[in-house]
Every structure is written in C-alpha cells, then in structure tokens.
Amino acid sequence: MKRLLLLLLICCLLFIPAPALVHAASGGVTAQSKGGNTSPTVDTITLVESGSENEVSAMTPLTAYRVKVTVGDINTLDDIQEIEFHIYYGSDGSNWDADQLAIFMWTKSSGWSMESGSAATSWELIPVGCIVPSDFSATTGDWYLEFKPGKLARATATQDWFCAVTA
C-alpha cells in the first residue's frame, strides 16, 4: 500500500508542473532565431573615383577617391559595430610607412574617423563623401569611405596600393 501511495505521489508531482510549462510557452509570444551572433563578412572592396562607381587602379596624391566596401551580416547590418579600413602602398603589400598608409574607421556609435596616431600626415578623411547603408535592417550594404591620399603618397600607374578591410 505504501508503494502504491508513493507511486501515486510521484506521478502527481510529475504531472503538476506540465500544465504550467505548457501555459507559459503558449499564447501570443513570437520570436525569430538567427542562429547566434555570426561575424560580418567583407564581400567586396573596390577603389572608385570620388562621386562615381568608376573603378580606378592607381591613385594620385591629394586627389579624392572612395573605397566601396560591401559588408554582409546574417544578423542584419545593425549588428555591425565598426569597420576598419587600411590603405597602404607596397608592391608586395608590406610597406607600413606613415606616408604610405592611412587607417580609417567607421563606428556605429560615432561615425567616421581617421586613425593617424602620433604621425603627422597629409592624408585626409572627407566625411561629407562618406556614405553608410540607408537600411540597417538589411543583411548586406555598401559603405563608401572618401579620402585623399597624402602629398607624400606615391603616384603610381600600377596597382601597388592595397586596401584591407575588417568588420
């Protein structure tokens, strides 16, 4: 008899929380799953003329250019906190001389900036020409960084300028 009562008590305890759990999970609760927080991807990087989509392969000092970057994020563009642009010269991509290098940043919280550290430079960020996507609820978008290479940057007819972008 004691075993039967104990078994009945255990069964009652197992079934009592079930309606509460079902009730808590039912109703007008809606949600979307995005599969976790995945890292953004840099899909394309293109050097273009200022104010156009015309690609260029060389730069002239003190002339405005744009770097067009297409970035994707499965969690929407609103998830992206910053994008860092490194523009540098070197036939093998290894020259990190301050005259031949500029680092630009876009941050969600404060917009565009140029990171020159303690080095004096004539490279210039042109904020009015910088563009961000208009729809941050999308999963891909284009950022346009507008800048002028410094007066000591090398004018070259070959593709010795590089741009590395991280998001």
Image (cartoon, rainbow, N blue to C red):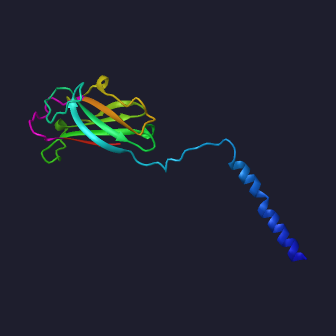
The answer to whether residue 120 is visible is no
At a point 13% along the width and 40% down the height, the residue shown is 159
Closest to the observer, 96 or 157: 157
Q: Which image quadrant for residue 153?
A: top left
> In which quadrant is the C terminus drawn?
top left
- Which residue ends up furthest to the right in the rendered image? 1
- Which residue ends up furthest to the top in the rendered image? 128
| Residue 157 falls within the magenta-colored stretch | yes
Q: Position of residue 160 (x, y in %)?
A: 13, 41
Closest to the observer, 146 or 34: 34
Q: Is residue 12 left or right of residue 124?
A: right
> In which quadrant is the N terminus drawn?
bottom right
Q: Is residue 136 left or right of residue 120?
A: right
- Which residue ends up furthest to the left in the rendered image? 157
At a point 33% along the width and 33% down the height, the residue shown is 143
| Residue 92 falls within the magenta-colored stretch | no
Q: Is residue 151 left or right of residue 84?
A: left
Q: Which image quadrant for residue 56?
A: top left
Q: Which image quadrant for residue 151?
A: top left
Residues in magenta? Answer: 147-161
The answer to whether residue 9 is visible is yes
Q: Position of residue 148 (x, y in %)?
A: 21, 28
* In the rendered image, the vertical position of residue 132 relative to residue 79, given as above or below: above
Q: Position of residue 45 (x, y in %)?
A: 26, 40
Q: Position of residue 23 (x, y in %)?
A: 73, 49
Instruction: Give the main secondary structure of the magenta stretch.
Output: loop
Total labels: the figure holds: 0
